[in-house]
Amino acid sequence: MLETPATTYNEAELQQKAKDHLWMAMARQSVMESGAGVPIIVRGEGHHIWDSKGKKYFDGLSGLFVVNVGHGRRRLAEAAAKQAEELAFFPTWSYAHPKAIELADRLAAEAPGDLNRVFFSSGGGEANETAFKLAKYFWKLQGRGTKHKVISRYIAYHGTPQGALAITGIPGMKEMFEPVTPGGFRVPNTNYYRAEESGYTGSPDGFGQWAANRIEEMIEFEGPETVAAVFLEPVQNSGGCFPPPPGYFQRVREICDKYDVLLVADEVITGFGRIGNTFASTTYDFIPDMITCAKGMTSGYSPAGATIVNERIYEPFKHGDTTFYHGYTWGGHPVSSAVALENLDIMAEEKLNERVRENSPIFRATLEKLMDLPIVGDVRGDGYFFGIELVKDKATKETFTDDESERLLRGFLSKALYDAGLYCRADDRGDPVVQLAPPLTIGPKEFDEIEGILRSVLSEAWTRL
């Protein structure tokens, strides 16, 4: 790990500069005006972070589902510095450089099936934007330009660019930007805990087929000759970590093949060990037509994203003057590519995928101890990616009203968890949940530490209802 020297920060000065000039992403700027200030994180090592006041926290979210190998890795910093000295930047616009070539080769080798072609971006939203545009263009090149619609799931998040936002299934994140790119349609997600609300009343064994069949239903309703692609996260993030029921992705693959619709696996979060393999598509035994990825590719030490496609999609671009007029200045950045390669080496050497597969059942069992609390309705997820759904009544699964959720999550839980030394996510895109996605380097001892903090804070939350 890096031996980071202690740095003294002028807290008041930083807070004032933040208030005057910093516009934070996905955040209420009113907190700046309130005088309370914002947490300022200044250092990270392993699975811990420190704020500008010197307080230490457990990073239970890997930054933002990103820092898979942990903070403070000297090897990654040195890989970045070495590459910056040799070639700090050159675009992949009609040119190439060694690190982009090597990373494309590495990703193709790790991807399932014949997903062999890699288009780089600088983040996950851009990777999904790329996939959306490429899907539409691919069908135009086949003489089937009416295939332009995309299907995704309720409350799924796929990014903030206008195209990716059209795929995103969270109305509250879209309404202020409407009209967004047209063509996005929604189907039920795989939250079995709330399946009855989507119309399913059968056993868990049949839920995967039922949920997948809703995709077929939507394709038929809209018309197969209008549907270009289906976008699905292997484990859906927004709403609280919905894993796929048995047989779900196998049935989705059948449906997409039947109607000639492309299947896109959004692995921006689930990729690079989060679920126990380089790609969760491998974990769940299906081969998509495209994989979008980012976050854990570099463990956050430099921005990077990619869209990996199969040979069928790439084939039209191998001939004549056909060109994909799309790209990002930072896509395939030399420094990011060098960091990604070193990050993948670390994951292989330390067997982090194997660690996740071995420890995931222990992590789940540890979190399921919280089910004895009256506020905990469900624990779900996979790998090192879990959500805890909070309820007002366990017997009826009654959830909180919008006002109650606001008071619970923003009025108490977010700050209380942070004050207790655990950085994680308390979210209400859907029903209220606490989400956990810690670095892949932790194990049972740290699982117990997380459970202990959650137990204390959630118990107090219940007394405040």
Image (cartoon, rainbow, N blue to C red):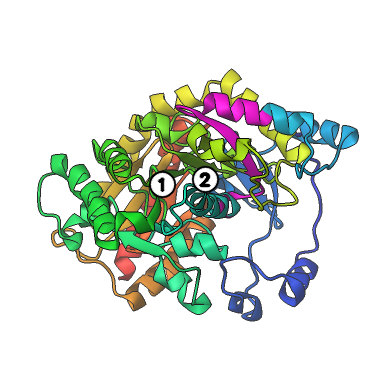
Q: Earlier in the sequence, mark 2 or mark 1?
A: 1
On the image, which quarter does residue 95 sit in? top right
Left or right of residue 171, residue 337 in this image: right
In screen coordinates, is 132 left or right of 455?
Answer: right
Tell me the kind of residue under disc 1: Glu
Residues drawn in magenta = 103-125
* SS of the residue under disc 2: loop
Percent of width and height locating residue 162: 55, 66
At label 2, the amino acid type is Val
Which quarter of the rendering shows the N terminus?
top right
Q: Residue at x 51, y 59 (%)?
A: 164
What residue is pinned by disc 2?
268
Is 107 covered by the magenta stretch? yes
**Above or below 155: residue 5:** above
Residue 35 magenta-drawn?
Answer: no
**Spatial distance from mark 2 to mark 1, Cα to Cα?**
8 Å
- Per the image, the residue denoted by label 1 is 233
Left or right: 145, with 200 as reference point: right
Residue 116 percent location from the top left of the image: 55, 30
Q: Which quadrant of the figure has residue 227?
A: bottom left
